[in-house]
Amino acid sequence: MVLAVIVVFAVFGAAGTSFADEIMSTGKKSEPSAWSKWLERPPGPFPGVILPDEPYDGKVVEQPIDFPHDVHAGANQINCLYCHTYARRSAVAGIPPTSKCMGCHNIIATDRPRIKKLTEYWEKGESPPWKKVHDLPDYVRFTHELHLKRFLFDNPEMSVERSDEVCALCHGEVKKMTVARKQKTLTMGFCTRCHEANDGPFDCMECHK
Amino acid sequence: MKQTMGHSIAWNVISRIPSEDLKDRASGAHNEWREMSKKKFDRREFLKAMGVSGVAVTVAGCDMPSFIASQEGVEEVVSYLSPEEFVIPGVGVWYASVCMQCPAGCGVRGRIREGRLLKLEGNPESSLNAGKLCQMGQAGLQNHYDPDRVTTPLARKGGKLAEVTWEQALTMIEEKTGAGSSIPKNRFAWFTGTVSGHQGVLMKSHLEAMGSTAHFVHETINNQVWRTVSKDMLGLETPRLRFDKAKLVLSFGADFLGTWMSPIHFSGQYARFRSTPDRGMLIQAEPSMTLTGANADMWLAVRPETEGAMALGIANILIKKEKVDASALPESVLDAIDGYDVTTTSRITGIAGDRLIRIVRHLKDLSPSLIVAGASACGHVNGYQSAAAAMLLNFLLGNIGKTIEPGENFSFPQLRPAEGGTRDLARFAKAAGEQQFDAVFFYGANPLFAAPAHMNMAEKLDAIPFKAAFSQFMDETTARADLVLPVASPMEDWGTHVPAYQGDRNAIVFQQPLMEPLYPGVRGLGDLLLGLVKMRNPGPLDDFEDYYAYLQNAFAAIPGALKGEGGDEDAPFDKNLWNRVLQNGHLEVPGAKRSFDTKVFAPDVAGHRENADYPYYLAPTPRAGFYDGRHANLSWLQEAPDQITKIVWNSWAEINPSTAAKLGVEQGDIVKITAAGGSIEATAYLHKGVHPDVVVVPMGQGHEEYGRYATGIGVNPLKILDPLSDGKTGEMALYGTRVKLARTGRSKKLVKAGDAETQHGRKIVATITADHLRRTEGES
């Protein structure tokens, strides 16, 4: 048992050294390291960004109303930021206020069962109790605002019309789903690899504050 | 009530985790540990286990999804229904309101996000606290979210309080005190803490409607003695004190940085006083060290009850030795001063003659100065006389008009607070003992906790046929009531408040709800008062659907000139002005300059009473934290170390080491403190910031009923107070109780922050001996 521990430690200890060196060498990336494969990867299809491409097969979350993202963002090509308008202004993207839904659905498709259900909520003066699909632990401070700034608004190769491509980096192909499903791991490894590859901030305190 | 949220605090987006889910998710990891802890582990086994799981963690590293991170579809995220445009989830909005943690009336701002109040800070617009807020104010947040709040009306049925509906509760009130009830005039009373603004107006209307004048206003921590002295000698109860204009402050036990009058306002002045090029000098004379005393340049342990003698002694030396012009003082005053030469004063007060002379020299050199007297000087049978002697020094030193200013008149006398002190507690005890009342309503006061045992308050309360408590918490008094009406927290309510001591500019402070009530079963105080007036005297106020409407109407009646730019006297309610005032948190109301009407008289300071049976004085000092005990239910303040001893979650007895040595008491020994009216036990904390004749047991602990954090912790020194009061004002002599001390033979370690009295040779705080300082600073 003890031997096994030592062996395992020897293997990972060695790898750990270069990892530590990498972290400690402030910003210099001269030596190949455990992380270098991310840097050497050819740029992906997304302009100006190296993607952490890590699929995850999230479960289908049952929602009060089966909101069809595919109809809104897919077929009708409504910009993500039209409904999730808080994403560019706040740490959280927010669920659109029910008044926003009703802005269109006062008139559009009022005979469909899902819209009828929505209208019921609206008339009761309540919002549907949506379930959170993408959730980070409370000790992580993630901000949509800064990520959109970096990848969309300050990215000369992108335009606001293509915001769905930016959102898809972390949220997957939402415009092909009905209700949202988690498609990326959203673990700390997922975050740090992207931060490393795209020169994001790397201080612990940046996210754990 | 519908209108109460009219100012649009949008509210929603709640993250809720059903508790079963929490249990499920936690169980995996938790069970493993539970299994492990069942076995007996030795160190070797433990390291082995850690080795294996440690490797597992290393392998997975940052990619191991924690059970928290990977949750999907567990929490709810409810969107806003139809938010205001400026409302953004995740971004806080600050709203102004008032702090009601003590009667000072500071302005606050609360950060609201997703309909929840998250943080309180001082309102920078307030000329009283200028953006600052003390620890008690910060803990206002906990007061709001306290898990022990009363959430539904309760009525006594078969000896026990049981839940009733509001309808039932109000019917009970109507039966006992309504227009159709048979309650005779003057058989009704209100017993409250400080109430001001329009709540005060409505309370007065209710009393009038009841045909009663009995309004008892009780504050254990008050400045009534000092205010009475100010009124008698200066003609004004609340002259403006300018610590910032003084070069020297001599304070006889006034803890103006902690609990005296308006601590945050004075702390601001104190900061300016200390940061002048010459740096103001602070001398504090008190029998037990307060927060202010701990900040002083010179701290003097004056013998209790002799503060007045010390002041007269200083006057004597000023006149005799320093030849200060005293021609303006009447002959009788000079005669009184004459008897207190250095030797006599030194003998009476226990302060060495050379120190008195040194203080006088400083007073002569550093002009203008400011002399104030606070709780420990005023809390004796000669309290008024001592405070008058201190004020006399201000006359002699020419401070009147320089560091004590008349200030401005407050234009709305009807909104001024009904202020009280401990005199009203004694008056109430007497009246209740004579069974003068058929019904008493309680709000914002806890007489049962504050009353000494000799008042027999519990029996007297029980003898009152109908007691209704308008209460946020189940405290001692509330638990004895026949009817409990849960009131909204200050963060959920509307109101106007007028600080007794105004800031640089007179203002009415506006209170607005920072969020929706946490519990649907609570009602605002204003709404309840309005309902009570309507119930007793239908007609005049029937037009107002709720207190919000009443307040808006009252606001419209304020003369336009006072509302500032755009204000129009004849205009009806102006929404824009109203919003601007709510945004600021207050309405400044300039008034005419006041002037002094001075009258100097000779104080009769007869000091120190010898008492062979009870040789020590009990000092139930107030601390900025529990205050008078009202904050003992806030765990933040229980957890915050005491300013002097650093002790948490307990009561203790501060004893001078020399006294302790005499009694054979050591640090941590439990001592029995016996007064004529009873005894308490507390753990001894020895330190030199206490006069040898004094034992300090801070007030605030020892609750028998006050929620999960306060009940059963510590002891209540107020219980064993002697039946003494100041001869002039009738205020209870809180510091006059005589006690004897005895060892119990038991001891207990007190929990305190730091827990070390020395720096172990490390210069964490640079220190210098007093002797060295005197030599290097050139003092003799």
Image (spheres, helix red, strand yellow):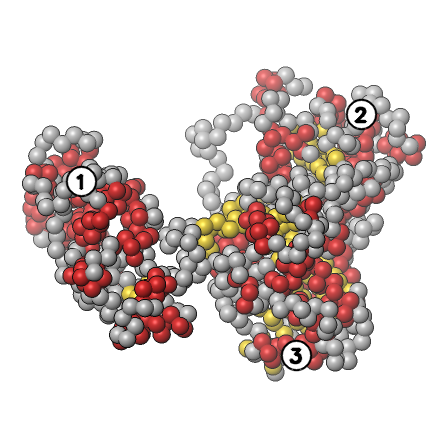
Which residue is tagged 1? A157
State the residue in front, A45 or A10. A45
Residue under the image location 55 percent in, 65 percent down: B3
Residue type, label 2: Leu
Residue B261 seen in the current view: no
Q: Is residue B521 left or right of residue B442?
A: left
Discs 3, 1 touching: Cβ within 8 Å:
no
Q: Is residue B712 left or right of residue B36?
A: right
Place residue B512 in its image quadrant.
bottom right
Q: Is residue B318 left or right of residue B780?
A: right
Q: Position of residue A202 (x, y in %)?
A: 23, 39
Q: Residues within 10 Å of mark 2 (few under 14, many from 20)?
A: many
Residue type, label 1: Glu
Discs 2, 1 touching: Cβ within 8 Å:
no
Which residue is tagged 3? B172
The mark that comes first in sequence, 3 or 2, is 3
Q: Position of residue B677 (x, y in %)?
A: 72, 60
Residue under the image location 46 percent in, 42 percent down: B754
* Mark 2 to mark 1 CA distance (whole Å): 83 Å
Foreground disc of the pair 3, 2: 3
Q: Residue B547, relative to residue B654: is it above or below? A: below
Secondary structure under the numbered disc 2 in the rendered image: helix
Residue B405 seen in the current view: yes
Q: Is residue A206 left or right of residue B534?
A: left
Q: Position of residue B308 (x, y in %)?
A: 79, 38
Which residue is tagged 2? B318
| Marks 3, 1 in one chain | no
| Marks 3, 2 in one chain | yes
Foreground disc of the pair 2, 1: 1
